[in-house]
Image: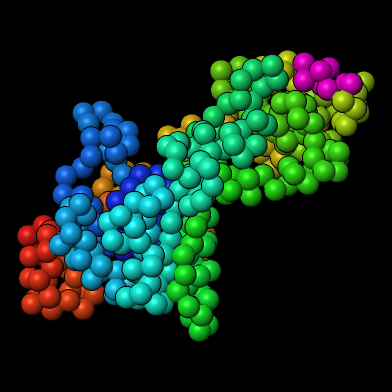
């Protein structure tokens, strides 16, 4: 029973940020029913070996299937929407309206509904109808320009800034805020979450630094972009890396001590002209030991350090093991729910469903009787008979 227990969400099948936002809600206890296409589209996201897709962001749902191109199926979807607290969709602007499932129709039949819309560019503006992906959205936001090495092309920060931090997480925040407003007596409304705007918000501190003259537009010329030698990652003797970031003087002094550089004649920490010298000294020092040897040296220190762990290594770190930060579901290791709620802990109720899995159970839980379920099936709604 999480903090969102009792909240019903209808999610329309998509990839990336929409499912991630729905995952966050499901982890927190919301009852998420995903409306899947009867058959998976061939190009709906990347597949792994053998064509199998391991859908971590789809966890905790139940599924029904509908061919939304059929008018009768659209009516079936609207019956689910009428019983929901939240709708999440990630189509191009205008798509849901053409299907007869847009916010005007949905809110007319369910005035308290929170209608969450996830797009890259937003519902309006000259780019609203154009295709794109994470890298395009964060490029337009300004954020991508600051990520990478000097004199080289910007580096894609995976797809974490646009799709997830600036997309799905922003959507989930907007949905929860709108739900709170409804519970306080407000009306239902549309949440227009755009990845470009979310990415820009993640960079808010940089705009402040820029305005105050403390940010240079050239990559790797600032403290937070790898320009400062004491805020970067260094290769170790075994080809792995250590990350350091002692911005404060007292922590920087600990770094020098652990590297064996304390007391030596070195440029001052914030003397930019001396940064190339410091970088060379740090590079030379880190190459003298393996990553694990450096971890032993730094253990217990406040030098603001951490080993750069691979995805496969991270779950085994003692910090994560102590907190149970990672979980395993059906053999798939993945991040556990976050943040923590001490009074009503979040939990994952299962892996991503196959198409239509647990759909009959979901309909019963949502108050549809046998006659209503038969009517929905006649309109095209499908689910696995195993329920």
> What residue is rendered at 73% in x and 15% in y?
284
Residue 207, quarter of the rendered image:
top right
**Foreground residue among 134 and 124:** 124
Vertical relation: 251 (above or below) 8: above
> What residue is rendered at 54% in x and 29% in y?
156
Q: Position of residue 113 (x, y in %)?
A: 40, 72
Q: Furthest residue to the bottom?
A: 185
The magenta segment is 273-280
Q: Position of residue 308 (x, y in %)?
A: 57, 32
Q: Any magenta on residue 161?
A: no
Residue 254, quarter of the rendered image:
top right
Q: Any magenta on residue 279?
A: yes
**Foreground residue among 356 and 293:** 356
Pick the quarter of the image with the C terminus: bottom left
Q: Position of residue 249 (x, y in %)?
A: 86, 40
Residue 224, quarter of the rendered image:
top right
Predominant secondary structure, magenta span: helix
Can residue 329 be seen in the rendering of this structure? Answer: yes
Can residue 322 be seen in the rendering of this structure? Answer: no
Picture mark count: 0
Pick the quarter of the image with the N terminus: bottom left
**Foreground residue among 221 and 82:** 82
> What residue is rendered at 69% in x and 16% in y?
151
> What residue is rendered at 35% in x and 44% in y?
15
The structure's colour scheme is rainbow
Compared across the picture, whether 233 is left or right of 130 comes to right
Q: Position of residue 143 (x, y in %)?
A: 64, 37
Compared across the picture, whether 302 is left or right of 155 comes to right
């Amino acid at each position: 029973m999480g903090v969102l227990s009792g909240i019903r969400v209808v999610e329309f099948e998509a990839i990336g940020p929409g499912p991630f936002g729905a995952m966050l809600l499901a982890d927190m206890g919301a009852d998420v029913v995903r409306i899947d296409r009867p058959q998976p589209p061939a190009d709906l996201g990347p597949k792994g070996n053998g064509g199998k897709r391991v859908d971590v962001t789809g966890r905790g749902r139940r599924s029904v299937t509908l061919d939304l191109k059929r008018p009768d199926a659209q009516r079936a979807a609207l019956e689910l929407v009428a019983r929901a607290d939240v709708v999440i969709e990630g189509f191009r602007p205008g798509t849901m309206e053409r299907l007869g499932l847009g916010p005007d129709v949905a809110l007319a039949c369910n005035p308290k509904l929170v209608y969450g819309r996830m797009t890259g560019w937003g519902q309006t503006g000259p780019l609203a109808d154009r295709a794109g992906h994470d890298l395009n959205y964060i490029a337009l936001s300004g954020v991508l320009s600051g990520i990478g090495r000097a004199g080289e092309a910007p580096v894609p920060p995976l797809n974490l800034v646009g799709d997830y931090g600036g997309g799905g997480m922003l959507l989930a925040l907007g949905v929860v805020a709108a739900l709170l407003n409804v519970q306080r007596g407000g009306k239902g409304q549309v949440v227009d979450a755009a990845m470009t705007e979310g990415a820009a918000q993640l960079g808010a501190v940089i705009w402040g630094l820029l305005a105050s003259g403390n940010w240079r537009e050239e990559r790797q010329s600032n403290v937070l972009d790898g320009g400062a030698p004491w805020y970067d990652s260094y290769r170790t003797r075994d080809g792995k890396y250590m990350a350091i970031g002692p911005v404060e003087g007292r922590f920087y002094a600990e770094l020098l001590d652990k590297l064996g550089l304390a007391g030596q004649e070195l440029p001052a920490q914030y003397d930019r002209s001396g940064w190339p010298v410091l970088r060379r000294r740090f590079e030379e020092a880190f190459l003298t030991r393996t990553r694990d040897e450096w971890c032993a040296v730094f253990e217990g220190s406040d030098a603001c350090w951490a080993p750069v762990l691979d995805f496969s290594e991270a779950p085994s770190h003692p910090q994560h093991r102590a907190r149970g930060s990672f979980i395993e579901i059906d053999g798939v290791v993945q991040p556990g729910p976050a943040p923590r709620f001490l009074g009503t802990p979040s939990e994952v109720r299962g892996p991503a469903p196959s198409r239509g899995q647990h759909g009959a159970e979901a309909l019963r839980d949502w108050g549809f009787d046998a006659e209503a379920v038969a009517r929905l099936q006649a309109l095209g709604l499908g689910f696995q008979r195993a329920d």
